[in-house]
Amino acid sequence: MEQGDALTEAPRASGTVTLTNLAKRYGATRALDGVSLAVAPGEFFTLLGPSGCGKTTTLRSVAGFVTPDAGDVAINGTVVTRVPPHLRHVGMVFQHYALFPHRTVAQNVGFGLRMQRVDKAEIARRVAEAVALVQLPGYGGRYPGQLSGGEQQRVALARALVTRPAVLLLDEPLGALDKKLRDHIKIELKRLQREVGITTIYVTHDQEEALTMSDRIAVMHRGRVEQVAAPRGLYETPATAFVASFIGNINLLAGRAAGSNTVDCGSATLAATGAAPAGAAVAVALRPERVRLDPTGAVDTVLAMTVAHVVYQGETVRYILKSDAGLELQALELGEVRFTAGARVRAGWAAADAQIIQEGIA
Amino acid sequence: MTRGARVLLLGPYVLLLAVFFTVPLLLMLAISLSRQSFGQLEWTLTPQHYIHFFTDAYYLGVLADTLWLGAITTVVSLLLGYPLAYHLALTRSRWKPLLIVFILSPLLVGIVIRCYGWMILLADRGLINATLVQHGWLTTPLPLMYNKFGVTVALVHVFLPFMVLSLTGVLKRIEPQLIEASQTLGASPRRAFFEVTLPLSLPGILAGSLLVFSLAISSFVVPILVGGFKVHVLPMVVYEQMLSVFDWPFGAANAFVLLLISVALIAVYIKVTERALRGIV
Ligand SMILES: Nc1ncnc2c1ncn2[C@@H]1O[C@H](COP(=O)(O)OP(=O)(O)O)[C@@H](O)[C@H]1O
Ligand SMILES: [Mg+2]
């Protein structure tokens, strides 16, 4: 197969990344267990999952630092699985930025261009442009040790972007920053990515980061991709129990599929959306904020329950409810406390707000 | 701990340094500036012994040889030690502790024994020459000993550990991500070494080189045993003047020249590192 040739040509501003059945083992650990993904040109694509689920290994396979045991990596349609990192033409931002401490900001940013033997005047011009892009004009002569964490982060970004790589890879780039700066840089990063239009693969274990920045998110668990979806789809229609519980807070009510859009959980019959073979073990996934207490409008399921706990959270109030048969449910409401512990309430929801989940039910 | 207690605890060492280092040093400086007649020291302030040293071709030759031996020992140690240190810094092998023991092994053997070891190998009838001659590959033995070559070999052998340890410490602290970053930016592994690893290991190169050079120019036993009085170095001259000729002022002046060279080197080292390390530390 043709490998790498296309990458040494003048790079395109944005590219595709395709992973096919990637597998990687470290001893007994399956770091990657059949990962397949297709990232579209210009897309902000996020790998989300708990620590140790294989996000970094996936990203490093794209960069070329991990050679998978099986499967292929293609960038811009060219298979690069066995192409060394320096010929892949990817931009990468490391968690601790990995700026060269013995070089100035300008030398750091210009490094990639120098490797490409771009002439000096052109390097100077493009470095100035990149430094301006990340809003650090006048910082060219400083050393990384003289910059704050946020500034270092931006230099790392400029350095990765200045060579116009096919794809930008970021491994938990906000992990080392404090919360306030993180929120600021999150917006900044997204703006920059749109402006440059570069295909981006972003790794994080922080669901909020993933939800606010991504075009699409792949949720990973134990070396596998559980679901790929846009943020809203992931939140509203989780495909597996793992995704449902990893993203936000959710009620998972175990039961057996009974006909279309109904689940029998023993003590009650629940309405939900989704199909499953009759009798299959399933769960109903229901966001707490979709549960309506003493509903006035139309609902598809109503359960008589008792308020077990009331958790006052300022902006919101969380109710822990129990049915007489032992079913537990959380409900979330905005505004004032309407019920106190021990009160009897009717909890209801629309079938469209509850999802039948078949995958990953214990 | 309070500041007072801290300073108090420095006391014993400061005292030790004062009594056994500073005072003798000052005494030696005084002796090097004194005059000696009929075995009696006259406390003067004469530069005559220094003038003697720097105007006599023999002593200048010894000085040049001493510096040359120091330089060549340093360069060879660096060239041999760098790959060793690089491997030591990166390896995750379980044999690593054993490798460290091997590297330190020259320091675990007494200096005289070590030198006799080299004599057994390098002498005209030593293992190497005997083998070569016996097999008819050579008719006359190679001059491996009683010359600068032999002395250099023996010096490199004993000072290599200092170079390796200085380098390993620095190489181990270089973030692997820096090398990866340079690779994603288009540097081949070889280029990454020269652009990132080598410049970042400069502090170790300088520290190791300085250490080896200072140790090499002040070594005494190795040049005597392996050089067999055919290789003359400054420490030997000091010894001769002090203990054979009994010209203490001149011996002291020689010792001071050696000391000043070391001090000057350290000064240069500090200046150079300050420049080279901008940003690194
Ligand atoms: N170089 C390695 N050697 C051994 N195990 C590794 C190595 N890299 C990753 N792993 C293991 O593979 C799994 C996935 O790791 P990683 O991709 O770093 O996870 P994540 O980035 O999602 O936290 C983890 O169990 C980790 O311990
Ligand atoms: Mg990781």
Image (tube, coloured by chain):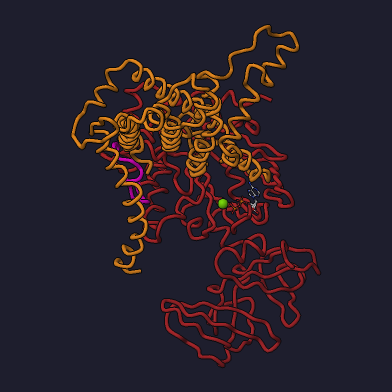
Chain colours: A red, B orange
Q: Quick check: A288 above or below A234?
A: below
- Nearer to the camera, A252 or B200: B200
Residue B190 appears in the picture as rendered = no
Residue at image position (51%, 59%) is: A206
Q: Is residue A40 left or right of residue B251?
A: right
- Nearer to the camera, A127 or B224: B224
| Residue B114 image point, x, y percent | 60, 33
Q: Quadrant of the C terminus of chain B?
A: top left
| Residue A315 image point, x, y percent | 41, 76
Q: Is residue A80 left or right of residue B4?
A: right
**Segment colored magenta:** A140-151
Q: Is residue A150 magenta?
A: yes
Q: Is residue A188 left or right of residue B161?
A: left
- Nearer to the camera, A289 or B191: B191
Residue A293 appears in the picture as rendered = yes
| Residue A337 image point, x, y percent | 45, 85
Residue at image position (49%, 60%) is: A208
Q: Is residue B142 magenta?
A: no
Q: Quick check: A315 above or below B262?
A: below
Q: Residue furthest left?
A: B45
Residue at image position (57%, 34%) is: B112
Q: Residue furthest top?
A: B139
